[in-house]
Image: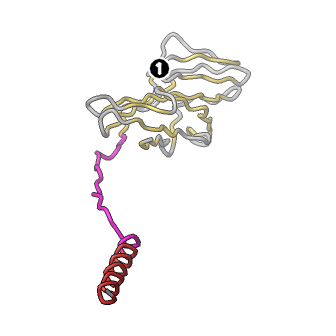
Amino acid sequence: MGQKNSKNIIVLAHLFFGISIGAFAQVSATAEASGNVVAPISIIKAVDMSFGNVAVGASAGSVVLTPDGHRTQTGGLSLPGITGTVSAASFDVTGAPNFTFYITLPSTPLLVTNGSNNMTVDMFASNPDITGVLNANGTQTVKVGATLNVGALQPVGHYTSADPFAVAVNYN
């Protein structure tokens, strides 16, 4: 019986250590990695901004051009019946269908000049405002308006910006 007991003890020891070793054994699982490449977002100018004809007065004023192309005046100027070309800026945005995007407008005034004379354009606003959504075809139009600040007795002439203003878009 002594030998049988010692065999049982050895078997039990192997069993015990086998279970103990198994209980601390490393286990693992696997996972796949994936990614989805979407069309890059892009923006191109379709239409330049134009405030049209403005008649100056003895005091300063401004012309507010909304993103939908309507304009109003404040201060000492008027908007003649012959409007000239009036248009909000328009940009075509393309990218991944149904994605949302963030719109960044200029935050500093833009200088428009005619020789040594100048005015500023500021208070840029867009439609859609701040964020847009690309449609099922991956397109969206962004329209941009702003405010033209006209000085008292501003010299007559055609004023343009030396550098265009930037509108940026990024996926949200």
Apparent side of residue 81 relative to residue 25 in the rendered image (left or right): right
Report if residue 39 lies within the magenta region.
yes
Amino acid found under the numbered disc labelled 1: Gly
Q: Quadrant of residue 45?
A: top left
The answer to whether 17 is drawn above or below residue 47 in the figure is below
Query: Which residue is at 57% across, 15% downward?
Result: 79
Query: Which residue is at 71% across, 25% downward?
Result: 60
Report if residue 68 lies within the magenta region.
no
Could you say where residue 70 lies in the image, as x and y percent from the top left? 50, 16
Name the quadrant of the N terminus: bottom left
The answer to whether 133 is drawn above or below residue 24 in the figure is above
Q: The magenta stretch spans which residues?
A: 22-43
SS at circle 1: loop
Could you say where residue 80 lies in the image, as x and y percent from the top left? 55, 13
Q: Nearer the viewer, residue 164 or 52?
A: 164
How many residues crowd around disc 1 within 10 Å: few (fewer than 14), some, or many (20 or more)? some
Residue marked by disc 1: 69
Query: Which residue is at 54% across, 29% downward?
Result: 125
Could you say where residue 78 lies in the image, as x and y percent from the top left? 62, 15
Q: Main secondary structure of the magenta part?
A: loop
Could you say where residue 58 lies in the image, as x and y percent from the top left? 73, 21
Outermost front residue: 1
Outermost bottom residue: 3
Q: Quadrant of residue 106?
A: top right
Outermost top residue: 81
Apparent side of residue 127 relative to residue 115 in the rendered image (left or right): left
Query: Which residue is at 46% across, 43% downward?
Result: 168
Q: Nearer the viewer, residue 38 or 7?
A: 7
Outermost right residue: 59
